[in-house]
Image: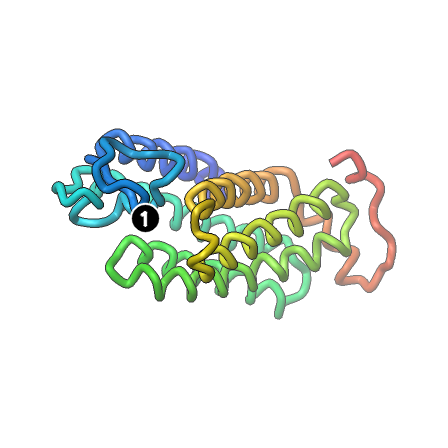
Amino acid sequence: MLTRKLVLPGIVLSILLLFTATLFYPGGSLVNKTTVGFDWENNYISNLFGEKAVNGSYNSARFWAVAGMFCLSASYALFFAEFSRKIPSKGASKVIKYGGILSMLFTFLIATPLHDLMVIIASTIFLLSLFYITVFVFRSGLHVFKVLCPLCLLVFYATLFLYGSPEHRGILPAMQKITFAFTVILVLCLEYFTTKEDFQHINAGSNKNPDKTAGR
């Protein structure tokens, strides 16, 4: 389907736009407001979205960052819509589809002044959809994904814990980027290395895990 073909180029484009934004970022971080440029160790991705950089300068990175976030959110929304068609349970399929799409709407709004609230709402709904996917992955024969899905959930939860703990925020910028990388990899792998047939036996009530996917 066309939507499936758009997920990969959409994510690649979003990464390119966000990387371009880092090249235009004037400077400043919560650790040192006088730094020049984007500090990969101490700057948050969200620093790219403000009208002004942390150092007070006009943020010329904002246009590129918002465009990148839009492409990322749209690509993930397409993924959730496409992946939901692989799930035989209508109830679970709807949670994955509509929950995932809704979480991406709130994810895009992270690029607005509502950032803090949107992070909480978007993360909660996103994790719910990913949890439903993980449940069906564990009932399938997709053995590699039985490691990738819970690992991604664990990394995401750890990052949210750091986000809510000011005393541990020193490593949060790094964890934010690690979480971003994990979710991108998982979304692309789920999109292009799973099929509807991987989950059909679940609907039939079978307890067998098809061995044809053992190498995945």
Q: Quadrant of residue 72?
A: top left
Q: Which residue in the structure is indicated by mark 1?
A: 46
Please provide percent x and percent y for residue 174. 46, 41
Residue situated furthest left in the rendering: 58
Circle 1 packing at 10 Å, graded few (<14), some (14-19), many (20+), is some
Please provide percent x and percent y for residue 164. 45, 62
Is residue 27 positioned above or below 79 on the image? above
Residue at 66% x, 44% y is 148
Please provide percent x and percent y for residue 113. 24, 60
- Is any atom of residue 81 visible in this view? no
Q: Secondary structure at mark 1?
A: helix
Instruction: Compare residues 172 and 201 and report the one nearer the observer.
Output: 172
Question: Is residue 128 left or right of 209 when viewed as pictured?
Answer: left
Q: Quadrant of the C terminus?
A: top right
Residue situated furthest bottom in the rendering: 91
Please provide percent x and percent y for residue 208. 87, 53
Q: How many marks?
A: 1
Q: Quadrant of residue 144?
A: top right
Mark 1 is on which residue type? Ser
Instruction: Compare residues 137 and 202 and report the one nearer the observer.
Output: 137
Which colour style is shown?
Answer: rainbow
Instruction: Compare residues 187 and 195 and report the one nearer the observer.
Output: 187
Is residue 19 positioned above or below 120 on the image? above
Is residue 59 positioned above or below 93 on the image? above
Residue at 17% x, 41% y is 59
- Is any atom of residue 173 visible in this view? yes
Residue at 53% x, 45% y is 183
Residue at 35% x, 44% y is 45
Question: Is residue 44 left or right of 199 when viewed as pictured?
Answer: left
